[in-house]
Image (spheres, helix red, strand yellow):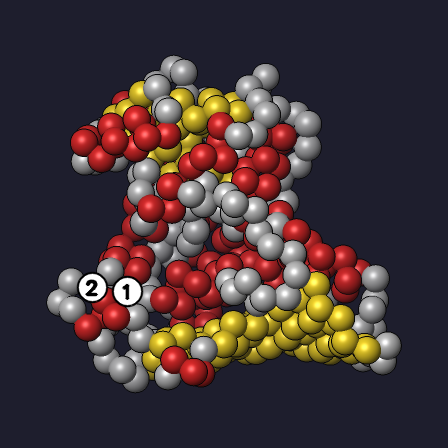
Amino acid sequence: MQKVRWGIIGCGNVTEVKSGPAFSKIENSELVAVMRRDGAKAKDYAERHGVSRWYDNAEALIHDPEVDAVYIATPPGSHAAYTLQVAAAGKPVYVEKPMALNNAQCQEMIVACEQANVPLFVAYYRRSQPAFKKVKELLEQKLIGDIRFVTIKLYQPLQPQLYTDNLPWRVQPEISGDGLFHDLAPHQLDILDFIFGPIISASGQVTNQARLYKTEDLVTAQFRFESGVLGSGVWCFSVAEQQQEDSIEIVGSAGRITFPTFARKPIVLETAAGTEELLLPPPAHVQQPFIQTIVEELTGKGKCPGTGVSAARTSWVMDQIVGRE
């Protein structure tokens, strides 16, 4: 491709700032069409973002001859079906995270894209953000020596909307695949996959303590990387406001690196030489650096650091942790 002309299926909240505007701010890339089942909302999005065409039917967008590649930004419950349709049309797929409801669907998506000979990318965009690339660089420089273990902590208070009868889709397993663990933990697990390589074994314990919805609100896990590094994690979504925490801690033989996944806080490097804080804020459109690498791969000028295969590994780890086959 000389230029990638994009279509979006599902132009909802995630596309307003995080991703949508980036498609037309990248060289050799343009957003030319959007789709939403509510045609009025699709039209409104198109007009506000300067997109030339809108649809209320996904098939029409997929088969638009002026759409070269499709970004699927719907909830996870429809990711697999749309991916199969886009692959059958012979077009590259960029799909939101989590990749699908479970690892079995992920594998189906991978096979479909392989058979159609089209690339499959998943929106684990932190792989291309400066802060996470910096953590990887610090580890490669052996500033904290040999890695001993890694610990994930994500503690959040109850969300106000969970007290209503109209629960958000993220805690409806038939739409999201699971609960808030399934929505947030994959970003953390994918970053560790990016830094350390594949996790080869994982297990966990889950429970629902607050009982405000069907899915678990507390998950504990332990896992082993192919390299031999061990890891553990705790995800709790019912703590007091003052107990909030968002950290990944990597301990080595000569120091420690601690950094957040979601919060705008610095990377903290602790060694015998002292403590250093590095604050590398994300870009205005957080997916833009990652989308840039996709465009570069599709135009033959580079390589994207994330694929369907690496995303499926993360899905497999989550399935192992929550005990899903």
State the separation of the CA atoms marked 1 and 2.
7 Å
Residue 13 to residue 242: above or below: above
At label 2, the amino acid type is Leu
Q: Position of residue 209 (x, y in %)?
A: 30, 84
Residue 17 to residue 63: above or below: below
> Which residue is found at the position 85% from the left and 80% from the top?
272
> Which residue is found at the position 60% from the left and 77% from the top?
151
Left or right of residue 232, residue 158 in this image? left
**Could one spot residue 224 in this view of the protein?**
no
Residues packed near mark 2 inside 10 Å, few (<14), some (14 to 19) or many (20 plus): few
- Mark on residue 84? none
- Mark on residue 171? 1
**Residue 303 is drawn in which quadrant?**
top right
For the C terminus, give its image quadrant: bottom left
Q: Position of residue 313 (x, y in %)?
A: 53, 57
At label 1, the amino acid type is Val
> Is label 1 in contact with label 2 (beta carbons under 8 Å)?
yes
> Which residue is found at the position 38% from the left and 46% from the top?
14
Q: Which residue is mark 2?
A: 167
